[in-house]
Amino acid sequence: KWALDKGYKYIYEMDADFSHNPDDLVRLYRACNDEGADVAIGSRYISGVNVVNWPLSRVLMSYFASIYVRMVTRMKIRDATAGFICYKKEVLENIRPAQIRSRGYGFQIEMKFAAWKLGYKIVEIPIIFTDRKLGTSKMSGGIFSEALYGVLRMKIRSFFIRYKKK
């Protein structure tokens, strides 16, 4: 909301612990500004698995969660839980808060799903994700179940929500 109120044309989301390389911001920007994407996702899975320093269990959980999301939603996005994204302002202006219910990692999925349902062009840009060197993950069983069941709930709700651009 703050970025929209300030009138920024592009709004970015990324991890602040350097898991996402700030140098890749330019690549996301170019995908939106030069190549016509409305949403550019820094994807860990568009060209294989590009994750450094994660335990295998975490890589597999994230990778298979993205497959699950693709199966349930029919979105073609390979990294549905990615948190490294460039949105054109118009996309965020058209996603109504009522369309987004999740608070954990499911939030990432719902934002992409709403943009997809609204017909925005979404592209994935390959990145290398490096796990944080400091701090701890917020991943928990509760967050995992919210994402798992939240995807089904989101898909069912989508039959009753009218996705329409302003």
Image: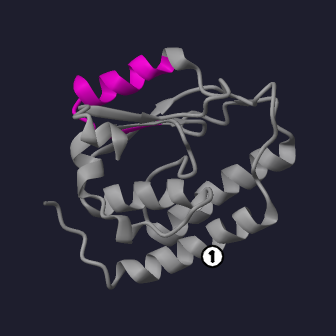
Is 81 situated left or right of 119 in this image? Answer: right
Q: Residue 68 location in percent, x, y?
A: 61, 64
**Which residue is rendered at x = 31% and y = 22% of the image?**
30
Q: What amino acid is found at the position of numbered circle 1 in the picture?
A: Tyr
Q: Looking at the picture, does residue 153 appear above or below residue 107?
A: below
**Which residue is rendered at x = 63% and y = 66% of the image?**
147
Residue 140 falls inside the magenta stretch: no
Pointer 1 residue:
149
**Which residue is rendered at x = 24% and y = 76% of the image?**
162
Splitting the image into 4 quarters, where does residue 33 fall? top left
Q: Which residues are magenta?
A: 24-41
Is 78 situated left or right of 95 in this image? Answer: right
Under circle 1, the secondary element is: helix
Residue 32 falls inside the magenta stretch: yes
Q: Residue 94 location in percent, x, y?
A: 24, 57
**Which residue is rendered at x = 61% and y = 56% of the image?**
105
